[in-house]
Image (cartoon, helix red, strand yellow):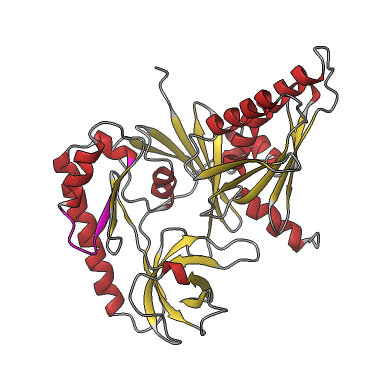
Amino acid sequence: MCEKNYTIVVDKEEKGVRAALLKNDDVLSFYFQSSSGEVRAGDICLGRVSGSRIHQIGWFMDLGHGQSGFLPGNKIASGHHPEPGELRIVQVEKEESAGKVAGLTEQVQIVGKGMIYLPLGGYTAVSHKIREHRELLRKQVSSWCVPPEGAIVRTTGARMSIEQLYGEFQELKAQWEKIREDSGRMSDSGLIRRQLSFIAWILNENHFPPSCTVYTNQFLAETGLPNHTSVVYQPEEENLFARHGLYGIYEASSRPLVPLRNGASLVIDYTEALTAIDVNSGSTVFRQGWETTAFDINCMAAREIARQLRLREIGGMIVVDFLHLNDNDNKEKVLDYLKEAVCDDPATVKIFGYTRLGLVELTRKRRRFGLMDRVITQQRQKGFR
């Protein structure tokens, strides 16, 4: 089995830091952290209800320091609806993006390395990637919970013993009690707890890989890093992205055109409602006939689309216009290629198949500010939208 070597490169920029996650020298995704202190996915805040219910959908909440979020009605954990001016504990589920405030939930998750504690969840579950003794493990964890508690055993929990999982369960439970105590001492809205440091947050999103080397040119107060994560501080390097050969990839990932082999390409267009991806044959020579060549291009495009979704942090609704195929079996094979290609994505990707117009519909759950959001923000600042 090929060993997987993970690397994180953290590079300072004018208004914060940017980071790239690599596996075996291939860039998987880019991350950003602002120096202005915006709330991040996973942050737990004390929010003040700033208005009445909006069209039976939810409530806007003041999170302090000029930040706001939206709490949908289906994310309420307690029995009564929020009242204007009321303070309530909420968690950031989706970060603020271009034109949208942060998405909030009262169904708090306290994240550990091997499990997630759900103080108000009311259910237990085991990662679908753990196949051995699933039900036995679920029942064991369920026995630790007192209603309305719940827990989820993560994929990384398979590397831990029952004793280690129980110890982490108790530790996460104590963290929740501390959060409640801290919120009780607050008189106004604001951040209660940031669960993970910037590096730990990246590692957590990627299921804490067995080993990782971090290169950074900015001192980061990192806590909670696994023992197998090493940090290499390089303050003399002004541009670590350039030093590690990442700048070209970063710049290319900000552009709509993605070249493929043999003259084919993708064009990625961000709109208000969705992301449209067009597969173009370009200068490809169809020596083997249209069907065979178009099928090969579509399969190649499917793999690259999966890579770009994660690289750019594309979320929400996505439609793909593959090259037209006449053979229905080939069409289904293209879908299978796409499904296989997205299976390692830490975000939830759902593929719905072909529309009547022959477009492929899919969704990708969005949680954080990524390269797509940065591009849209820059376009708006320049007056393109």
Would residue 37 be visible to someone looking at this image?
no
Give the residue drawn at x 70%, y 27%: 298
For residue 160, above or below residue 43 = above
Q: Which residues are magenta?
A: 144-154
Give the residue drawn at x 43%, y 27%: 5
Instruction: State the image coordinates of residue 366 (x, y, percent, origin top left).
Output: 54, 53
Would residue 56 be visible to someone looking at this image?
yes
Q: Quick check: 161 left or right of 269?
A: left
Q: How many marks?
A: 0
Residue closest to the eye, 134 or 366 = 134
Instruction: State the image coordinates of residue 180 (x, y, percent, origin top left).
Output: 26, 72
Instruction: State the image coordinates of residue 92 (x, y, percent, origin top left).
Output: 45, 63
Reply yes or no: does residue 262 show up in magenta: no
Quadrant of the rendering where the N terminus is positioned: top left
Q: Quick check: 166 left or right of 1?
A: left
Residue closest to the eye, 224 or 131 = 131
For residue 86, above or below residue 169 = below
Instruction: State the image coordinates of residue 328 (x, y, percent, origin top left).
Output: 69, 27
Quadrant of the rendering where the C terminus is positioned: bottom right
Residue closest to the eye, 158 or 354 = 354
Q: Quick check: 111 left or right of 31?
A: left
Give the residue drawn at x 35%, y 37%: 229
Q: Quick check: 289 left or right of 268?
A: right
For residue 18, above or below residue 66 = above
Q: Residue furthest top?
A: 288
Reply yes or no: does residue 147 show up in magenta: yes
Magenta stretch: dominant SS? loop
Q: Quadrant of residue 380?
A: bottom right
